[in-house]
Image (cartoon, rainbow, N blue to C red):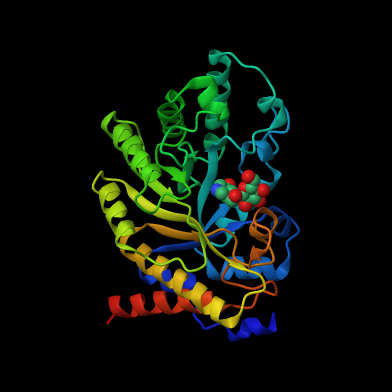
Amino acid sequence: MDDHAQAPRPPLRALAERCHFAIGAAVATQPLLNGEPDYCALLAREFNVLVAENMMKWDALSPAPEQYDWTASDALVAFAAKHAQRLRGHTLVWHNQLPAWLRDRSLSRTEALRLLETHIKTVVGRYRGQVWAWDVVNEAIDDSGDYRRTSFWFRHLGPDYIALAFQWAHEADPDALLYYNDYSAEGISPKSDAIYRLVRDLKAQGVPIHGVGWQMHLIEGWRLEDQHLRNAERLRALGLELSITELDVRLTLPPSPAQLDGQAESYRQALSFALDHCRALLTWGFSDRYSWIPSFQPGTGAALPFDEAYAPKPAYHALWQTLAARAGQLHA
Ligand code: 9MR
């Protein structure tokens, strides 16, 4: 933690607040529940919005039918309240991380509808007024631009589940911002075209959707391009807001200093874009000590702004400088 003293002051959240911007990170279950001192101190210090990496997913919340265990999610909600941080809720409807009791069951359409409505209303209702924005539907479109037809919810309900999920979430917390969230959604592609059509049609039908989340799990070398601006503009023209919800930039391991600098440039460009076009930017974790990347993408990692010992990396300094420059301009 000594290296930590080298982090420029003030923290990211103080600079972000001057820009009316939300800067945040996903929170891992174990270090939060264990109250790991360095982890919790940095989490509280640097960020003004948090999201549960896993704690609010269906399998984490509901180990058995009609049973909920709120231990971890309540701990996160309490942590955020204590440190005056907003929360993003992740995620209500997804094909992954469904509890086995649900995934392995054969359901009629009526049963599937009842289970989904009850789950959404139970979770959103419990945290009504405490969650700023929910990822209501996650990853419903595949890379070819079709619905993800093999997903549990599509198989049981067809595409109707998407509008219903937003409606139910809205009934449970009329003040929460409701998002559609996906990966590889930031450029112009068959997938982002399909997301655009989906959210455009939802808006046209009067479905309560307020935003689109771009996850942005990036590979090294990523740079902002005109296609990202065009995509943002068409979504915002629908009256939707945007957030970068799960940013990380993975590197082949072990990274060289040049790779870390290149990564910092990706972070800088993503944040600079977000300050112009988005409500929030959250990274998927904040320290390389806890990141999904090495186990899912073997041979790669080092994707986050702090290293495994919680020392700030060039990516952290790039975020800091970008926010500081913007905060300075606003107050010049
Ligand atoms: O980071 C999450 C990891 O701990 C889980 O094992 C994994 C299981 O599917 O989900 C990861 O988070 C995902 C997020 O919920 C949705 N977008 C992609 C993220 C990375 O896979």
Q: Is residue 25 above or below residue 182?
A: below
Q: Quadrant of the C terminus?
A: bottom left
**Residue at position x 45%, y 60% in the image:** 281
Whether residue 250 is visible here, answered yes or no, is yes
What percent of the width, then of the height, locates residue 242? 36, 52
What percent of the width, then of the height, locates residue 304? 58, 67
What percent of the width, then of the height, locates residue 182? 47, 45
**123 on left or right of 69:** left
**203 on left or right of 257:** left
Q: Is residue 323 above or below residue 32?
A: below
Q: Is residue 108 above or below residue 34?
A: above
Q: Quadrant of residue 61?
A: top right
**Residue at position x 64%, y 78% in the image:** 311
Residue projecting furthest to the right: 34
Q: Is residue 275 above or below residue 130?
A: below
In front: 28, or 85? 28
**192 on left or right of 168:** left
**273 on left or right of 55:** left
Residue projecting furthest to the left: 237
Q: Quadrant of the N terminus?
A: bottom right
Q: Quadrant of residue 223?
A: bottom left
